[in-house]
Amino acid sequence: MRLILALLLFTSVSASAQLKSFIMSVHGDTLNRVDMNDKKQGPWVNHVDALRGEDGYDEQGYYIDDKKDGVWVRFSLTGDKIAAENFRWGVLDGKAQYFNRTGGLIREESWRAVDPNKTMDTVNVYDVIDPNKVIDRVVVKLEGKTYKHGTWKYYDPEWGSVVKTEEYFLDKLKNPDEDIKPLDAKANKTPAKPKEVMDYEKKNSGKKKVRTRDGGTGY
């Protein structure tokens, strides 16, 4: 038993020695860790004071290499849960929910984070009627860090009913009356005329009457 305790103590001290700074929770856990490269790592608790009319808040979540990752929960300074957000690569990704002071759901957002190492990505296009049905996959150029992507719902926080719904595709608000399937430019393009036809039309351009052969044998 003493050996196990000694090993646990050694592990804790060794891990702490690799950190530049940290704080201890009431349960003895290390929080707000900063590694030797000045990057935030692991579980963190942030406190933001009220400033210039903006409410203050506390939030807790996880950092990986100085970037928020996973679920982050935000509380008012009186302890009420006011938000639950998902992060990836330090930006919003997936579902984000916001609540009023009594716990009523106000808004539910949907986000898509962008891999900072990519300039292009392939995304699914979903059916408007059946949001779970993929009707196409398109390749897009990435120009931002995160996009409004998917269904956004606005609620009556007292009754919990949906009062408004919006559909986004990479930051663009969809018109529910439009077909969201991307158009195939090739399918709608008029076939190019053969070179011989174009030369003929150019040669005879402006002439009132051009004699042509129609394949007939009579007059």
Image (spheres, rainbow, N blue to C red):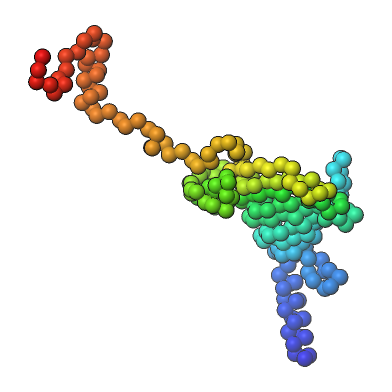
Give the image location of residue 125, x and y in percent.
Answer: 53, 47
Give the image location of residue 147, x and y in percent.
Answer: 62, 45
Q: Nearer the viewer, residue 212 or 56?
A: 212
- In the drawing, does residue 111 fall left or right of residue 216? right
Q: Residue furthest top?
A: 208
Q: Residue furthest front?
A: 218
Residue 155 shows in the view: yes
Q: Nearer the viewer, residue 191 or 59?
A: 191
Give the residue at x 74% y 57%.
Answer: 72
Residue 40 shows in the view: no
Give the residue at x 77% y 81%.
Answer: 9
- Point out the image quarter for the C terminus: top left
Q: Nearer the viewer, residue 185 or 25?
A: 185
Q: Residue furthest right?
A: 78
How many tags in the picture?
Answer: 0
Q: Residue furthest left?
A: 217
- Write down the quadrant of residue 212 in the picture: top left
Give the image location of residue 122, x and y in percent.
Answer: 50, 50
- Write down the quadrant of residue 194 in the picture: top left
Give the residue at x 83% y 54%.
Answer: 103
- In the drawing, does residue 184 fall left or right of residue 214? right
Where is 78 relative to 143, above or below? below
Where is 197 relative to 78, above or below? above
Give the residue at x 77% y 91%.
Answer: 1
- In the drawing, does residue 128 fall left or right of residue 87? left
Where is 201 relative to 179, above or below? above
Where is 150 relative to 211, above or below? below
Give the image location of residue 143, x and y in percent.
Answer: 56, 42
Q: Nearer the viewer, residue 78 or 95?
A: 95
